Image (cartoon, grey):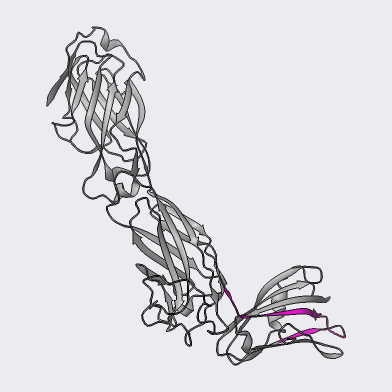
Amino acid sequence: MFRSYGKAAVIAAVAATCAYSEAATIRVTGAASNVSAEGAARNTTGATIPVTVDLAMGAFQTRDSVIRLSLGGITGAKFASYNASSPSVSCTDGNIVLDVTRNTAAQGTWDFGIASTSGTTSSLSCTFASLAVTATSLSSGTLTVASAVKRVSDTDFVYDTASAKTVSTVASQISSISVVTAFNGTVDYTDQQGLGFDAPGDTAAGDITALGSADNLVVRVGSVADTYLSFASNLTFALTIEAESGKTFAWLDSDNNGVLNNTTGVGRISTGSSVTLDTAKNTITYTKTATFTGTAVDFTVSFAHASATPSTGIAIEPMAFPAASATVSSLTNSALEVGSWGSNGTTVKIPYMPINTTPGSSKIDPIIILTNRSTVTGTVTVNIVNARGDSCAGTLGTIEGGQTKSLGGSPLRAVLAGCADYNIAAGEAMNISLTATLPSSTTELFTGYNAESGRVTVVNSLNGN
């Protein structure tokens, strides 16, 4: 099909022999400057981005030459399919007949054959007003359009070229993922046996059934407003939280069936669209869908006990959470600082404790005996500083309810074996800070040491009260 545009003029006989590289110019109008990558990818209704191209030719054009518009900058970008009656082209300052029936399927180029021309076309300006780009062909990047001409004597489009001009910037509509409120709960070992958080706590998220005090993590997702092609459907927010090394979220699955049940379970977590716990019970994955249109969206993950006065379940382990990771679409923040859970358990200071493992009269064995008169199982950790100021830390193990356990023998030596600056064979004098996730009112600690002269009692901050 042929269409004729413009005003008649006279073409110079020598026009076909003249070559002007980079002579034409392109101006893009009518296109959206910002396009949502998510909106483009999720569109299933054949949506397109309209584009108007003004092409000012800088060289003489002749019959049977072909003008090509080419998309660039984004691999796979395609013009929308069209028929013989499209696009709408208007040209000025000359007569030119274009054949627009060359391409009928979506592709990255659009050709316009010059069926005939007359007059001087070096100053010809044409407007292609009905172009469109297929939304689903776009990915993140800068979409451009360029033009060039292939004459009868050419093997490629190298004549009267126009440098690429930006059509649209395609980018994720998600701009940021950050922590608004970090975990800061205090596990209550004084009144709740470590089963819940000490009040005052946070208000549990609306999708969690709990009466006890909660501790919340709030993660905020920012997005960009006023992008062309808004989301056709919701996007998924995915958050992964790992427990501190050596600790777990077992208290959320007290019946050990791998299911987080917020209806009958004692440990509760806000459900979102989905919350899963891995088989080792040390990684939680939280997902929820939402629409992002420029207003910040907050996601609240609540942890709580079902009861205001917990009496059953597994104790919550105080922990310093490692960095968590959250993702929405193409944006991931893998270094979210999500806070920690402390406790109001038992802390005991042992200001002086000697040790010397050399056999004979110099040998000194520390004695640390802990009695747990509560019904819960606690973890005992230790921080040690010697007389030179060298410090190290470790775990002395766990102690179940109603038990007495010696921690000053092999458990303490195992920790000291990892203290690179210590020489326990030659003898060390230590200042020990011991922490047990147990109620202080039901925890007893005897400290001392065995030496050649016999057993010597060491006063600590618990038995010295």
Eyeballing the image, is 10 above or below 199? above
Q: Is residue 45 left or right of residue 325?
A: left
Which is nearer the eye, 69 or 313? Answer: 313
Is residue 245 in view from this perspective? no
Eyeballing the image, is 409 above or below 14? below
Name which residue lies at 22% across and 38% down: 80
Eyeballing the image, is 336 above or below 195? above
Give residue 141's quadrant in the image: top left
Q: Is residue 352 magenta?
A: yes
Number of residue marks: 0
Q: Is residue 60 left or right of residue 267?
A: left
Q: Which residues are magenta?
A: 342-368
Give residue 191's quadrant in the image: bottom right
Which is nearer the eye, 41 or 19? Answer: 41
Query: Percent x, y for residue 376?
Result: 55, 87
Q: Which quadrant is home to the N terminus?
A: top left
Name which residue lies at 23% across and 44% down: 47
Query: Percent x, y for residue 414?
Result: 69, 77
Which is nearer the eye, 61 or 181? Answer: 181
Q: Which quadrant is home to the C terminus?
A: bottom right
Name which residue lies at 33% across and 50% down: 38
Q: Is residue 262 magenta?
A: no
Q: Is residue 359 left or right of residue 37?
A: right
Query: Percent x, y for residue 216?
Result: 47, 69
Q: Residue furthest top?
A: 13
Q: Residue furthest left?
A: 1
Is residue 51 in view from this perspective? yes
Query: Percent x, y for residue 187?
Result: 55, 77
